[in-house]
Amino acid sequence: MKFLLLLPYDNSSDNQFRTWGQGISNAFASGGLVNTNAVGSINWATVLRPTGSSQVAGFEVWRFNDALQSTAPVYLKIIYSSATNSPGGPGIQIQVGTTTNGSGTFLGTQNTSLQNLAAVAANGTSGTLQTSFMSVDTNRVAGAFFLGTGFNSTEQYFGVERSKDNSGNDTTSSIIVNWGKAGSTWGQQCIPVSGGVPTAEVRWCALGPVGTTTANAGSFVVSPVFPLLGSVQNPGKNFMVLAVNDLPQWQIITLNPYGTPTDYVRLDDLGTTVMGLANSRVIMRFD
Amino acid sequence: MAIFSASFDFTTANTVGQVKMYLPIHNAFMACGWTDVSASGALFPVNGTRGFPVGAGTEWGYDVYAMNDASQSAAPIYVRVGYGTDAGAATTLKITFQVGFAQNNSGSITSAQSITRTVENNNNTSIWSGSLLYASGDGSRIQIYANPQQAGHPWITSLERTHDTNGGDTTEGVTLIGRNIAGAINYSDVLLPNTGTYTEAQWAVLMSQNNPSTFGGSVGYGVPFPYFGRIMNPIRGLLVIATNEVGTIGVVTSVPIYNVSQSYAYWGAQAGSLTPGNSPASAAWMRWE
């Protein structure tokens, strides 16, 4: 299920904080993920806004709700907080793994470290609603938040999905996690259900463009993003990469990953170094 | 398939240098099985000089070679190798590869689609000595890595036909992928005779930024993918390796490409900056068989 969310980039009041946070939370639920109601989870009726920089107001733990969840569980913890150096700016932190203790703490080693996606020093923009996109189903989630503010870099991206077989079907072997934030901090990590966990990548692994366009002979290059477990794994479907001028911002395009028509939306122009190439941009699954 | 190596000392400051510049490249094409089309006016080993002095921005010689494989009659591919001086100075080396689909036996590539790539232009004004040129190929491909241990001077290039999903050659077109180190230029060129040309200023590879990349017993090898409005099947002539995993100079490693084991050699780290943002720091392995 796809969501176009107009969220206040604003922690100036409890109401504003609850509005953007609960907007995200509601999309998780509407899309088909399950709130584990972990002990200590945020209460949207009573939670107070963060009043300090990088201050945690509360968290939720969501899980997949597909047929594979019983044998290969996937949990996503999302923390609702504030910008690193500004209490007025909303901040999202995520952590993904296979096992939790029921109180918001991941157990074992099969998980990412906590990724703080908050902008460093982005003040809130009181009264202004910012564009955000989410795409959620029982077995995946992708989100891109606070895009195109025009006054500061506030974008915050993440995606979680299962590993894929050669046909693009979900497998139980690992979890594909991608994230990004303002300030050109990008990362991806593939979390196997067992065994060693590779070091997180500091960029997305894709075949990106150098120039502003790859258009030629009536088509242009769109690259999947490939998880890495020593070797290159079958790509996920949440995100892809293309050249800046090959698709306008906010444009929706139908692609055929693994032969299945799937809609993607071109995200903002701030994510310029998703893979170390200044002209690369991100498109996100939007269905 | 053949491998070839030769001394690559040269200078553009005299005719002896011109010969030394020409012969290793010519002999590499011959050793790999290509055909010298004996174009009128071309250089030949017996008269490997076009005279000295020459001014800046002057080409003093060339030769034209044809692939020599089963597809050449139906899908011909030619490369014109030009030798001269760059525009900057009379002592500045310049080597060009012009790739196309037809030639006129007089030193011109005549197909509608062609691309000229300066594989080397070096502002070094001194005589080089102790350099080497390595080549690998057959009648359908050639890989050349010149001066791989000489900082600032190396150049590496791979010319091969496009490939199908099994790695077999196709008659769709040709790829020219390489790096001109002195010019700090990466190039990934695709020519399709019936469609056009496309140039990408990088080797598009899938690489971990972790250096070393080793995880679970696997080492990351970046296989360059050409673009032509789409991602094409990767080339087989070159690989990108993180600097902490390149190994020892001269060591040959077998790597499965298209599920077929191929041999690649590491000749030096000078051809770096092959990954986006140079992350990780990388070097090239060249097909060596």
Image (cartoon, coloured by chain):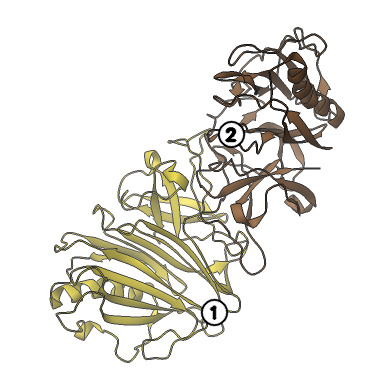
Hey, which quadrant is residue B66 in on the image?
Answer: bottom left
Give the camera-side residue of A4 and B180: A4
Q: Quadrant of the C terminus of chain A?
A: top right
Question: Where A214 sits versus A89, above or below?
Answer: below
Q: Quadrant location of residue A117?
A: top right
Q: Residue A16 placed where, x, y %?
A: 75, 20
**For mark 1, does the 10 Å Cα neighbourhood hold few (<14), some (14 to 19), or many (20 or more) residues?**
some
* Residue that numbered label 1 is attached to: B71
* Residue B188 seen in this snapshot: yes
CA gap, disc 1 and disc 2: 54 Å
Q: Which chain is yellow?
A: B
Chain whose colour in the figure is brown: A
Q: Nearer the viewer, residue A83 or B267?
A: A83
Chain label for disc 1: B
Report the residue at 75% width, 17% height from top.
A60
What residue does disc 2 label? A153
Q: A143 above or below B92?
A: above
* Rendered residue at 42%/50% (across/down): B274
- Where residue B215 appears, x then y in whole percent? 51, 33
At 80% across and 11% down in the image, what residue appears? A43
Q: How many labels were placed on the picture?
A: 2
Can residue A161 be seen here? no
Amino acid type indicated by mark 1: Ser
Q: Chain of mark 2?
A: A
Amino acid under disc 2: Ser
Q: Is residue A38 above or below residue B238?
A: above
Q: Position of residue B52 (x, y in %)?
A: 15, 81
Which residue is at 15% across, 61% downward?
B129
Count neighbours of disc 2 (C-alpha within 10 A) and say few if under 14, some if 14 to 19, many if 20 or more: many
Residue A81 in percent (x, y) is at 66, 17
Q: Is residue B140 left or right of residue A33?
A: left
- Numbered disc 2: secondary structure: loop
